[in-house]
Image: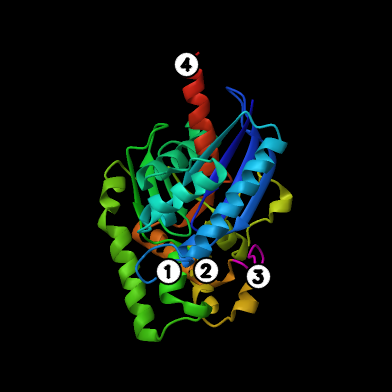
Amino acid sequence: MRLGVLDIGSNTGHLLVVDAYRGAAPLPASSVKEPLRLAEHLEADGTISRRGVEALTAFVARALEAAEDKGCEQVFSFATSAIREAGNGDEVLRHVEEQTGVEVRVLPGEDEARLTFLAVRRWFGWSSGRLAVFDIGGGSLEIAGGDSETPDVAWSLPLGAGRLARTHFPGGKAPEAAALRELRKDLRTVVARDAGTLLRGGAPDHAVATSKTFRSLARICGAAPSSEGRFVRRVLPADELATWVPRLLDMDLADVAGLPGVSSGRAHQVLAGAMVAEAVLDVFDLEALEICPWALREGVILDRLDQLSALG
């Protein structure tokens, strides 16, 4: 069965086409993505700008055409925090549906964390024991933990790399030292607020990170490039990241964009993402995070295959 997953994220619109079979790993067949930066297309009143709406609508139309060209039987479309929190989110999605015929479902933050956890569990398997899973998106940070396929706890925090870049690092520049210290403290306070709900179940056997932000940070810290394949073990060590945060503070965007694993379109978010990652490692007292190549889109596909299997 050929399926499409259309992910309207805070940073990027991404259509992933896969050949999916029950009991087998989804096999990527095609991918179309575009940097929408919806988290940065917000007006002062919290609504998505007309420019952002038009860019989103045009992308959905192109993605639908690509899915049809590739022979997708079904396309599952969802939006995450940028649409979820926008003051005109419902209006935006109505406009998209009117113009393209595509109904985009808003995915609650808890579901986002839950489905990402499912993907990580399937990737690492039962032998990985109790998992703690972290995902930094453009608009939010998702956290989940447990020892089953459904996490015991799952929640979402407004600590996405795109959101923080827009509010605290305009133009990619770091704030003054006092403001930076305050931000560092605030990040840890927000992450720590519900940390006990995850830790109450016991220390994780594996602490895992997903998303482009974590993959880029791991690459900066010495992880293998994507050209070496998905099955190479990659980690983000806390001590290595700690040496990079002050270096990132002193770098301009051109230098950041030249780092391994960083695209020019995301260079302005790297420092914000690094500070969130460092807060996660500190609050949960982790020496490293292991990088998982599967994340939310794979979780959506796996969940759908499970539903089809239950129907017989």
Q: Nearer the viewer, residue 36 or 162?
A: 36
Neighbor class of circle 4 (other Cα within 10 Å; few <14, some 14-19, many 20+) is few
Q: Kindly identify which residue carries mark 4.
A: 311
Judging from the image, what secondary structure is the residue with disc 1 in? helix
Judging from the image, what secondary structure is the residue with disc 4 in? loop
Q: Main secondary structure of the magenta part?
A: loop
Judging from the image, what secondary structure is the residue with disc 3 in? loop
* Residue 250 coordinates in the image, percent (x, y): 54, 83
* Residue 259 marker: 3
| Mark closer to the chain start, 2 or 4 | 2
* Residue 164 marker: 1
Q: Amino acid at mark 1?
A: Leu
Q: CA distance from mark 2 to mark 3?
A: 13 Å
**Is residue 287 found left or right of 155 in the rendered image?**
right
Q: Kindly identify which residue carries mark 2.
A: 269
| Mark closer to the chain start, 2 or 3 | 3
| Mark closer to the chain start, 4 or 1 | 1
What residue span does the magenta drawing correspond to?
258-265
**Is residue 259 found left or right of 158 in the rendered image?**
right
Q: CA distance from mark 4 to mark 1?
A: 42 Å
